[in-house]
Image: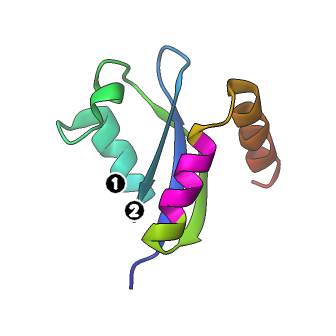
Amino acid sequence: MKDYFVYIVECADGSFYTGITTNVKRRILEHNYSFKSAKYTRSRRPVRLVYSSLIGTRSDASKEEARIKKLSRLQKLDIIKEYNKSL
């Protein structure tokens, strides 16, 4: 069984994109260089990883992704700030 991550990238225009993946490094490369990137990030390259969290199951990761997407920009900035403190 694969482990899933929830991640947030900051786009070149300052906006955030939230997604799930089993391999964060590969997914960031896809967002920046591949046609496999999300349509949203393709026109907002380059992106940089600002948050990632190991969640476990795909179901739990999808629920966490949905929860984060509903947050305001300020709330997302708080999550990112806490994440960076822990590095």
Q: Amino acid at mark 1?
A: Arg
Specify whether 67 is left or right of 29. right
Residue 26 tag number: 1
Can residue 76 be seen from the camera position used here? yes
Query: Residue 55 lies in what quarter of the image?
Result: bottom right
Q: Amino acid at mark 2?
A: Asn
Magenta residues, as a range?
61-68
Residue at image location 76% in from the left, 26% down from the top: 74
Specify whether 85 is left or right of 76. right
Residue 23 tag number: 2
Q: Outermost residue, left direction? A: 35
Q: Are marks 1 and 2 in contact (CB under 8 Å)?
A: yes
* Residue count near mark 2 (Cα–Cα under 10 Å), binned few <14, some 14–19, many ≥20: few
Can residue 50 be seen from the camera position used here? no
Does 37 sit above or below residue 6? above
Q: How far from the left and from the top, in percent, is residue 81?
A: 78, 39
Does 30 sit above or below residue 46? below
Please name whichever residue, 29 or 44, is drawn nearer the observer in this view of the structure. Answer: 44
